[in-house]
Image (tube, coloured by chain):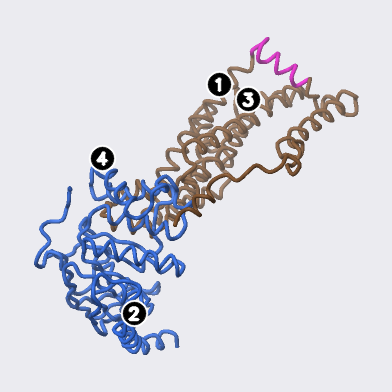
Amino acid sequence: MLSSAPAMDGNNAQILCKDVSHWFFKSDGTPIQVLDRVSLTLEPHSFTSLLGPSGCGKTTLLRVIDGLIRPAVGTVTVGGEAVTGPSANRAMVFQEHNLLPWKTARENIRFGCKLVGIPANESLRRANEAIALMGLNGFEHHLPSQLSGGMKQRVGIARALSIHPQFLLMDEPFGALDAQTREVLQIELLKIWEADRKTVVFVTHSLDEAILLSDRIVIMGTRPGHVKAVIDVDLPRPRSDDMRADPVWTNLRRHLWQLLKPEMIEVVG
Amino acid sequence: MNAHDTQALQAAADPPASVRPPWWTSGRAISIASVIVFLVVWQWVTSAGYVEPIFLASPTAILDVAYDQFFVSREIYPHILVSLTEAFVGFVLAIVVGVLLGLAMGRFDRLRAVFEPFVMALYATPSVALLPLFILWLGIGLWSKVLIVFLGGVFAILVNTMAGVRGANPKLIETAQSFTASEGEVFAYIILPSAMPFIVAGIRLAIGRVLISVFVAELYASNQGVGFVVTQAAASYATALMLMGILLFTLAGVALSQALTWVEDQFLGRFREH
């Protein structure tokens, strides 16, 4: 199998953020700090969730790791190389799926491959592979407007997977889905990830989603966005939905909520 | 998992014939009937002598004149050729310049800042008001008319194209960039397809303006062209010939508009907004 990934060992699949700070500018020119000295080490082949209230900078941090945003201060190193822009070894899955409305499901999947320079026959093979993996058979020729929210996000994930990235960056991919679809896709993502263990960074609002999927949860606080705590999830793999009743799960959930609650109250209040 | 979705996409059973609306209530049938009634009333009013032929020629009189012009005297062809040349050259220039400049101005804010005051001023000015100036510059031949046609059409296309470019979904642009797209790839794969419906809408808007420009330019100063024929006919009270000339403009407008719809349906259906 053709693969862009070199031997994935040691720090090759590590993500390192060092003292990352970033500011946005309001339309009147006032700066707002969105990230404040964020330092993080994400282990190779681990699944890390960034958890926090709206405005904690988790989405910005994900874009910094992808290279879509160059941080004002600090450095990000992915797989041993300093990030200067987006790269074919990282793939992003977006909350609102971001499919091109004039391309069919399969064309959308192949679009990502085309942009990173994968030849046409190989991209066709990969797209078909991803279609089968994501349960999209029979929908390849549908336009996004003909697909349900869950199906669109399946296409979004397939598009990211088919460039065979070493790193998968997911920006609240299930945030806009209904509860049932969300649970189905969580379990599917879990299976796919446990099969080949890419290094994943997963942004979410949901405590249970973070616990179910992650090896490690990074809790972020607001004003400006900073890392508040990093917590390991001590649940065995393979994970399953049934673990929700496990005392480890319930204790962890309580602990996470205690950490998040003051932040949430600040945001809401 | 997907069985329900698949079912919904398949056609359901045909409804019983009794619940179908009768054919004569369809929009198309009513439109055709409406036109026929209009023509019959027109013919009746004019041929029964309620209206002087000088004020309004009957449909059959117009057909007679058209037959003479197209098949007997064959005098109309050079005029059609002149008008078509003016319209074609001006329109093509308007499309090329309007689309290219609109794309550039939509994408580059500073370029837009440079050109926007002029574009807005000229878009607001009725372009035919500039005709005396252009005749002074270029004479009453082809090029003053081409310039007027060009100016009449270009801004509708330019402004629409610009709006289309600026309306391109920034999330799709970010997505392409995340998959390492260059600025050129973003333009070709995201911005241009997003702007496509707007470009077509601009061209459609320009059709009417182009025809007005041709007509007014020939009316104002010329010695050939369909607009000139209409003017001459009116001056000599040849009402049927005048109406035939006007109908030629109508036909040109309808034909262009239909051609654009055809192109849209054939090639651009997917780019419509979803």
Relative vertical location of residue A20 with respect to residue B14 in this rendering, above or below: below
Q: Is residue B42 above or below residue A186?
A: above
Indicate which disc, 2 or 4, sits on the residue closer to the N terminus: 2
**Residue B138 included in the magenta stretch of the image:** no
Foreground disc of the pair 2, 4: 4
**Which color has been applied to chain A in this rendered view?**
blue
The kind of residue tagged 2 is: Gly
Task: Residue B135: give x, y in percent of width and height.
Answer: 53, 33
**Pointer 2: what residue?**
A52
Q: Nearer the viewer, mark 1 or mark 2?
A: 2
| Main secondary structure of the magenta stretch | helix
Q: Chain of mark 2?
A: A
**Residue A174 point in image, percent of width and height:** 39, 67
Neighbour tally class for label 1: few under 14, some 14-19, many 20 plus, Cα within 10 Å: some
* 1 and 3 marks on the same chain: yes
Query: Badge 3: few (under 14), some or many (20 or more) residues near its Cα, within 10 Å?
Result: many
Q: What's the CA distance linking mark 1 and mark 3?
A: 9 Å
Residue B226, labelled with which disc? Answer: 3
Residue placed under numbered mark 1 in the picture = B81
- Near-viewer residue (B49 or B133): B49
Query: Are both tags, 4 and 3, on one chain?
Result: no
Query: What kind of residue is marked 4?
Result: Asn
Where on the picture, by quarter, is residue B129?
top right
Q: Secondary structure at mark 1?
A: helix
User: Quadrant of the rendered structure where residue A265 is?
Assistant: bottom left
Q: CA distance from mark 2 to mark 4?
A: 42 Å
Say if mark 3 contacts mark 2, CB within 8 Å. Answer: no
Residue B171 place in picture, x, y as percent: 38, 60
Span of residues in magenta:
B61-74
The residue labelled by disc 4 is A121
Which chain is represented by brown in the image? B
> Callout 1, which amino acid?
Leu
